[in-house]
Image (cartoon, grey):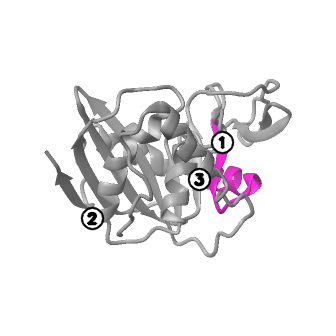
Amino acid sequence: MQVQAPHKWDLAPKAAIQVQRELHSKVVTRNELGPVRTVAGVDVSTAGQRAHAAIVVLGFPDLQPLEAAEADLPLTVPYIPGLLTFREGPAILAALESLQIEPDLFIFDGQGLAHPRRMGIATHIGVIMDRPSIGCAKSRLVGDYVQVGPKVGDYSELYHQGEIIGAVLRTRENVKPVFISIGHKVDLATAVDYILRCGMGYRLPEPIRWAHKVAGGAKLPGIRAEQETLF
């Protein structure tokens, strides 16, 4: 799956913020998701001065693994809050290059519109790929919400500056909720629905759980994996 970024990654913060603002105009928040037969989880781990991206494709709705792609690249951008994609994006695009299956839906371990400039990693990469994407984060970046109900499926809307930017969703009883937001080409109700449908009784949806393991170095049996290391 070939994807070319329309900008450089190693930008000064002011220039990176300008890129985010320009890309924001291309975000589609209506649902343009067609039939979903495959869903991919995307995660990036960092160690030292390297980023390791993993994309794991699962069949839907059975959630059985079909393919895993990885890429390991040197980090060229420091960690700056709100500009995470410029640090991790190159590794994700490199992993995409070796992906043979083009997923119908991407779920990112991170924010989408629930970002100060509405340009989290799920939105940024979703726009670059021009594919339906969802952000599923373990913690809040910005916004306010009321307490979420105790049952699976209960959620509260996440607000920031008078705008609904996401949903705080209970995916498992007696554990903390997750933060769901639009990435690209899905609406919020659809995003919440697919996160719940990708659950297997855990806090995180199955595509993210698998991607997290692979990004951390695990090799999952039965999956055809492609890995690229760039020095």
Q: Are marks 3 and 1 in contact (CB under 8 Å)?
A: no
Q: Earlier in the sequence, mark 1 or mark 2?
A: 2
Q: Earlier in the sequence, mark 3 or mark 2?
A: 3
User: Quadrant of the rendered structure where residue 172 is?
Assistant: top right
Could you give the CA–CA distance between mark 1 and mark 2, rounded to whole angstroms?
Answer: 29 Å
Q: Identify the amino acid type marked 3.
A: Leu
Assign the C terminus to one quadrant of the image.
top left
Q: Nearer the viewer, residue 14 or 61?
A: 14
For residue 145, side relative to residue 8 (left or right) = right
Which residue was labeled with disc 3? 23
Residue 194 forms part of the magenta stretch: yes
Q: Which residue: 42% across, 71% down? A: 102
Which residue was labeled with disc 2? 98
Residue 117 forms part of the magenta stretch: no
Could you give the CA–CA distance between mark 3 and mark 2, rounded to whole angstroms?
Answer: 25 Å
Q: Position of residue 205 (x, y in %)?
A: 53, 46
Q: Position of residue 6 (x, y in %)?
A: 44, 59
Q: Position of residue 154 (x, y in %)?
A: 77, 38
Q: Identify the amino acid type marked 2.
A: Ser
User: Quadrant of the rendered structure where residue 214 is?
Assistant: top left
Q: Earlier in the sequence, mark 3 or mark 1?
A: 3
